[in-house]
Amino acid sequence: MTTEKRQYSSDEEDTPLSRTSKRRRAAQLDEEDDDTGEFDSDTALSQVSETPNGRTPELEEEKTTRIEVKSEPTKKPRKKQATGLNKVKKETSTRKTKTSKSKIKKEEEGVGEEEEEDGGYKWWEAEKEDDSVKWTTLKHNGVIFPPPYEPLPSHVKLYYDGKPVDLPAKAEEVAGFYAALLGSDHTKNPVFQKNFFNDFLEVLRECGGTQNNIEIKDFNKCDFTKIFEYFELQKEQRKQLSSQEKKQLRLEREKLEEPYKFCELDGRKEQVGNFRIEPPGLFRGRGAHPKTGKLKRRVYPEDVVLNLDKDAPIPPLPEGQKWGEIRHDNTVQWLAMWRENISNSFKYVRFAANSSLNGQSDYKKFEKARQLKDHIDAIRKDYTKNLKNKVMLERQKSVAIYLIDVFALRAGGEKSEDEADTVGCCSLRYEHVTLNPPNTVIFDFLGKDSIRYYQEVEVDKQVFKNLAIFKRPPKQPGDQLFDRLDPSILNKHLQHYMPGLTAKVFRTYNASKTMQDQLDLIPNEGTVAEKLLKYNAANRTVAILCNHQRSVTKNHAQSVQKASDKIKELEWQKIRLKRAILQLDESELKKRPKYFEELDDLTKEDEASIHKRIIEREIEKCHKKFARENDKRKFEGQELLTESDLKEWLDKVEETRRNYEEELETREIKLKSANTTVEKLDKQIEKLDQRIQVSAIQLRDKEENSQVSLGTSKINYIDPRLSVVFCKKYGVPIEKIFTKSLREKFKWAVESVDETWRF
DNA sequence: CCCGGAACTTAGCATAATCCAT
DNA sequence: ATGGATTATGCTAAGTTCCGGG
């Protein structure tokens, strides 16, 4: 019933043209388009779509474009970027005095928070001008390599055409990678199968084929289930370990990790993020990734480049091994890197999210987004005006910025043939946008991570007209909508509004701005739980804006069912109590008829099904309790409970069942305590009402959140200071909103902001 | 310019850890 | 205390942007 969240592009109806040639074709179109392209600002929509092979473009216009384009970059060289940030820094320093004062107050009050490992260095209270140099000293202990491959026991094998295969360890390892995924969707994906099988055969060939003369040719004759089952068994055994043993293992792991967890940056102890080298395995590309299933090869020390200061001791390696390279580059914030074999790019070992350098980057990111406040009006005015610009490039730019600003689209860079076909703004194609006059647009495309973006929206009239122009024949499916645009052109354009302004800043800006606006709407009243719910609702609007999705969990439907059953049960209980009141004193009905109205809401059938559910649950409970109790007794060598003991419990349930049945007929409630009163029952009903309220809200929240992921926007888009201010102003403990690791990541925000701060 | 490499930021999913009702 | 449900974290893929060299 749930629509699949991630979309695997429909079976290659891909045109014979490769994506790159599509692009080229689009470029040709442009020239033609320019010929047709005199854009009258008042062109009516009908005219636009009609416009056949229009007139030649005014050459003047062409010239102006070129001149404009050239003159733009002269304005400022790239490296400048710092200027904008320096301004930000000054702003900070004025705020600093305030901040440190409030900090002192805090300390006087003796707020003893969590322990800090880094000695409490507060970079946000320090001044630092040039940030191209990231550190002066950097020492660390390198990385953890995955353990070497452990061959399977000799009775666990791959079967080919029904026969056991003796694989060389290296090939067996690869087979094992596949076997381990048997339960997952990956192994159902033909691309995954094919890529895996190719690489598996290659490894097998490299190590001289199978050891018992079986030639593996057909993937469909391979049976990995024995290996899979062995892994499952291992998993099970690991789960069965006593908590003692588990603890032991954990301690050993922690001891091994200890030296790698921290490094020394400018003399301070800071945490390292991903100090583990990624283990070999099968590449799990998302969506319709052409390389999914390929073997991700093992990384050895000689593949790894370390980055540390010149005087830092070089982390030792086992005899005979050496690091690929030792570097001393203090303009970057990585500690180690290696080249990965799937797309031939680099992987980095970097500082943890709570490190000072990452904190500073975050801070700068949000300050830059805040700066956009001062320019956004001009930018909006500008792009609105330029929607009617006579130059095609300008129109494309303004429409693109409009989409990025209004719908929070990503920039959308060009992608190569061997990646999943996903798009962002600049790479949108003809088929991703459907136009419904007068001004409704349907966006339907796969974005980052192959997450579907589907929106039916109304857009500015002129935007609509322009989109129609961008789709005008001879353009057709497969062609680029913005055929003259790419992120670098767009970003260059944005630069001249504000240094450092790029497409992604709009997402940050609009996310945080939306959050601020939503938080402003929340009244400062009610319980902490209620406020939290409203905070989450605000968070959710941001997540929806950014299209942050998650797959519904396997047991979502079940859990919703359970929750709504629970509510129904509570309501039934309430009704029951009300009946009881009437039983005690019939005159109550006349006194407050409204109160008893809901007695009629519950049909006999509903009531019966509630009864049934309760009874079934009780019976199940008896069985479970029986089984568990006996397990325990067995373990302790005690006498076991007999079937008759179980029967006794079940009989009790049966009795309840009969009571319910009777109650259903007679509507007569058997009251538990004899001396109850109307007042007491009223109290109980009130309590029930509250519980029902709470449960109903939680249920709604659960449903609304089932496909929306709040975390991504909380971590990356919403200025953390907004949350801190919210907590302070509304008396909500920050722990309710930021987990421990987020509090550490956003320490700069938690400690530096007072109630008056605004995004 | 254009291209691709390099560096950094953002993303969802699997699983570990924790919570919470029983 | 248990174990099923929920939440937090770890992992690594997939974006954007910067940058330097032809």
Image (spheres, coloured by chain):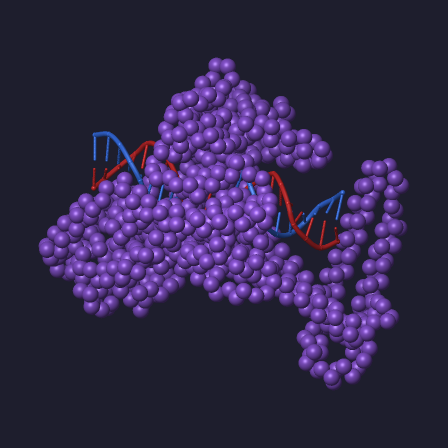
Chain colours: A purple, B red, C blue
Q: Is residue A640 left or right of residue A531?
A: right
In the foreground, A548 or A161: A548
Foreground residue, A489 or A555? A489
Q: On the image, which quarter does residue A182 sit in?
A: top right
Q: Quadrant of the N terminus of chain A?
A: bottom right
Q: In the rendered view, would you say A565 is above or below A577? A: above
Q: Provide residue A616's location: percent of width, then percent of height.
A: 75, 58
Q: Return the residue found at the far bottom.
A: A590
- Residue at 77% x, 57% y is A618
Quadrant where the C terminus of chain A is found in the figure: bottom left
Name of the residue lying farthest toward the top: A320
**x and y percentages locating residue C19 in the rendered image:** 29, 36
Could you tell me if residue A210 is visible in this image?
yes
Depth order, front residue of A186/A676: A676
Q: Position of residue B4 (x, y in %)?
A: 30, 34
Counting labels gives 0
> Does the rendering let one see residue A175?
no
Q: Is residue A210 shown above or below A399?
A: above
The image quarter containing residue A657 is: bottom right
Q: Residue at x 79, y 49 (%)?
A: A625
Left or right of residue A234, residue A130 in this image: left
Q: Residue at x 26, y 54 (%)?
A: A397
> Residue A368, percent across and down?
36, 49
Is A326 situated above or below A678? above
Q: Residue sitting at 50 percent across and 45 percent down?
A: A747
